[in-house]
Amino acid sequence: MSDFKYKHGLVVMRAQPFHIGHQKLVDRMLTECERVTVILGSIQEQGTDRNPLNYTTRKKMIQNIYRDKLEYERLKIIGLFDINNPAEWGKFVLDFIKESFPDLPTPDVYYAGSSYDAHWFKACVPHIELVDRTDQNFPFVSGTMVRDMIRYGDIRWKNFINPTNHHIIEEHFNKKKGII
């Protein structure tokens, strides 16, 4: 009998950038799931206002936070291109995991920050766990909000990004502005 509620938890996120809301979700997954898979979507896009960071940078931000923790061995971070068929997205993701990582069990739970984010997986994953983004004890955060703060020079973005990753954000956006 496992000490975990679920065998394999899955989440898909863009993490543009990986912020404290994403970290809250992954932390919960690591307490509830024997295996955790984070899929970073939209890997075909980078350098745009909506998707400024490439896949490698986003993956590194997650690794920086979890690499020195015991739970890291249970965490898999992979990238995936988007498909232009929203109705098939959930099945596409699960097929991708099954074909690319046959050693991983089929996810038995999908984690999401909203019911909209979860609806792609309701028909193909037995359990859905919503992580409340409006918790009064946790600040509301969105990637758009953080990107806008960074873009407009509002240093409060640092409140929403794990300090271990501040240098990544500063280096990336300073290069983009031509400061470095």
Image: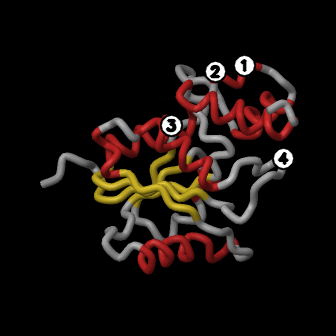
Residue occupying the point 31% across, 50% down? 73
**Residue 29 in the image: above or below residue 96:** above
Residue topped by disc 4? 49
Q: Quadrant of the C terminus?
A: top right
- Which of the two labelled residues, at mark 3 and mark 1, occupies the earlier sequence position? 3
Please say if 122 is above or below 63: below
Secondary structure at badge 1 equals: helix
Within-10-Å neighbours for mark 3: few <14, some 14–19, many 20+: some
3D distance between C-alphas at marks 4 and 2: 21 Å
**Disc on the earlier residue, 4 or 3:** 3
98 left or right of 116 in image: left
Residue wearing tag 2: 159
The numbered mark at residue 13 is: none
Q: Residue furthest front?
A: 180
Q: Which residue is mark 3?
A: 23
Q: Nearer the viewer, residue 174 or 83?
A: 174
Residue corresponding to mark 1: 156
Q: Amino acid at mark 4?
A: Asp
Q: Is residue 141 left or right of residue 107?
A: right
- The mark nearer the N terminus, 4 or 2, is 4
Element on which disc 4 rests = loop
| Neighbourhood count class around disc 1 (C-alpha, 10 Å): few under 14, some 14–19, many 20 upward | few
Question: Quarter holding the N terminus?
Answer: bottom left
The tag earlier along the polypeptide, 3 or 2, is 3
Which residue is pictured at 64% across the width and 35% down the height? 168
Instruction: Indicate the quadrant where residue 133 lies.
Output: top right
Q: How far is mark 4 from mark 1, CA to CA?
A: 19 Å
Q: CA distance from mark 4 to mark 3?
A: 22 Å
